[in-house]
Image (spheres, rainbow, N blue to C red):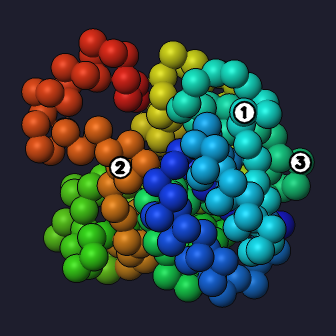
Amino acid sequence: MKELHIITPVKDSIDTTMETIDAIMASRLTWPHTFTIYNDFSTPENTATLARAAREKKFSLINLSDMTSHASPNYLLILQEAQRKALAADAGLLIVESDVIVAPDTLQRLADEAVQRSQCGIAAAVTVDDEGRINYPYLYAQGSENQVIDSRKHCSFCCSLLTPALLQTFDFGTLDPSKNWYDVTISHASLKLGLKNYLFTNLPVVHHPHASRPWKLLKYKNPLKYYWRKFTRGLDKI
């Protein structure tokens, strides 16, 4: 792995997005790296805010409206574009979602830990709430704080590094276009390829779940309504 390609998919939720951007930009990184925001059809106002931030903070901004007319979410397109660029540069693909706040040393340590493990497919940072408690989507790791877990469960892409070992052996062009999210599929593919997925509960990142799609909070507040919307409207396909 020669460098890191850090990406953040964005769909509105501009306040949490700006916190994510600021945290990434404040990261202490010795790895050569790039940082790209993929703007997935945010409102014109939020798109303008992102454009202004990109000029001021010096990160790359890709507006998916320039690439596709397909309605958001366009995670498949983002992953395929990011894989193509990472493969060309022998880079690791480090996904930080727009409702996550990394610590200054998170990304450096995650990359360092990944390259120390030759069979690493995915290296993921555990998510916590504002009080430091492990939260969704890693509730299964509660009670295993401050560890490195060789995980057989899926790794979320909240803050995850997909290594060149995975990117070179699993073609994102084979992913099912009828789905919306691919962390489960890619996690399982990594394991089937003989790679290992590691969850670092000693590298917590703050996560404010579903900030960009608040309707998904119904999963916890009103599960019946959430699943009704999910299945009747064909939303949130994993």
Q: Is residue 148 left or right of residue 160?
A: left
- Element under label 1? helix
Instruction: Give SS at disc 2.
Output: loop
Residue identifier under label 2: 210
CA separation in Å, label 3 and label 2: 32 Å
Residue 131: x %, y % from top left: 22, 79
The disc, 3 or 1, on the residue closer to the chain's N-terminal end is 1
Label 2 is placed on what type of residue? His
- Give the alpha-carbon distance from disc 3 to disc 1, as whole Å: 24 Å
Residue 141: x %, y % from top left: 25, 62
Lower position in the chain sequence, tag 3 or tag 2: 3
Q: To which quarter of the image does residue 203 belong?
A: bottom left
Q: Which mark is residue 192?
A: none
Q: Position of residue 176 (x, y in %)?
A: 55, 19
Please identify the residue farthest to the right as the structure is shown.
88
Residue 9 in the image, given as x and y percentages of width and height: 59, 49
Q: Nearer the viewer, residue 98 or 143?
A: 98
